[in-house]
Amino acid sequence: MLSKNMETFMDCDKELAEARTILFGAPFDSTTSYRPGARFGSSAIRRESYGIETYSTYQDKELTQAPVLDCGDLELCFGDTKKALAQIEEFTREILAGGRRPFMLGGEHLVTLGAFRAVAEKYPDVEIIHFDAHADLRDEYLGAELSHACVMRRCWEIIGDGRIHQFGIRSGDKEEFRWGKEHVFTRRFDFGGLQQTLKKTLKELSGKPVYLTLDLDVLDPSVFPGTGTPEPGGVGFEELRYHTVMVCVQANVVGCDVNELSPPYDPSGISTAAACKIVREMLLALE
Ligand SMILES: [Mn+2]
């Protein structure tokens, strides 16, 4: 049911009839391999959003004017990963059926698979832009195929070769990178010298439906310590903001997610503030 939550991301409380983007949370982290806590990410983003302005000085736009409805967090079946993913898929399908854009807040990165299944069903030619520290291309991790370390591999099984475009990647095992070379596009460490790589990708994807998945651990842990698998050597906030907005403005983003904020590892609140700000910028850029 697409209905307004009691508490919403600031000013994302429009009526369903006028909403073009549906925000919702997928508070799930049962396959997190190192430090759990991402299940609290979406509610923290919603709650702390009131700490930043509705106005974006970057884009000269107001969130109060944005056609966004926040439906709150899904009640997911913990302990049954398949069922939780099916619940996310079903909810995303309902959003898409009404001609709206799903914008999911994680949760661990595996939640992307649930939403992406529904998006790929509606848009069979969809391509993925993936910002992350980790390649997430393992075939299995600790015996599990449904793990956040395998999420991009599972998405590849749906759409096939040459349609996943990764940026910021700086961690994975040797086999993942070997496999990745044959099946996906991976830009290591950043978004490309003088933005040429992402710009080139966006040019190639012009007009095509795009799913944007943003694992916030692409940020350096010095600006984003609140995450389950921190990976030093990441991008700065401004670099991420610039490139994320670029994708949201230039690409035909038919669905997106922001994931892997883990509030228990964010005692100062800076990671949650960074997450809130990037979500605001994305919502404004997507209009
Ligand atoms: Mn990651």
Image (cartoon, rainbow, N blue to C red):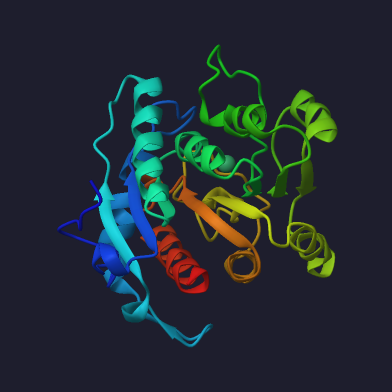
Location of ligand 1 given as a quarter of the image: top right
Viewed as shown, does residue 238 lie left or right of 48?
right
List x then y, in percent, for residue 252: 61, 61
- Camera sees residue 267: no
| Residue at x 19% of width, y 56% of height | 5
Residue, far left? 6
List x then y, in percent, for residue 71: 26, 54
| Residue at x 74% of width, y 51% of height | 189
| Residue at x 24% of width, y 36% of height | 75
Of 234 and 129, the residue lying toward us: 129
Viewed as shown, does residue 274 lie left or right of 237?
left
Of 126 and 173, the residue lying toward us: 126
Residue 199, picture quadrant: bottom right
List x then y, in percent, for residue 46: 29, 59
Viewed as shown, does residue 205 lie left or right of 59?
right
| Residue at x 63% of width, y 46% of height | 126
Relative height, residue 17 to residue 118 (above, below): below
Relative height, residue 13 to residue 185 (above, below): below
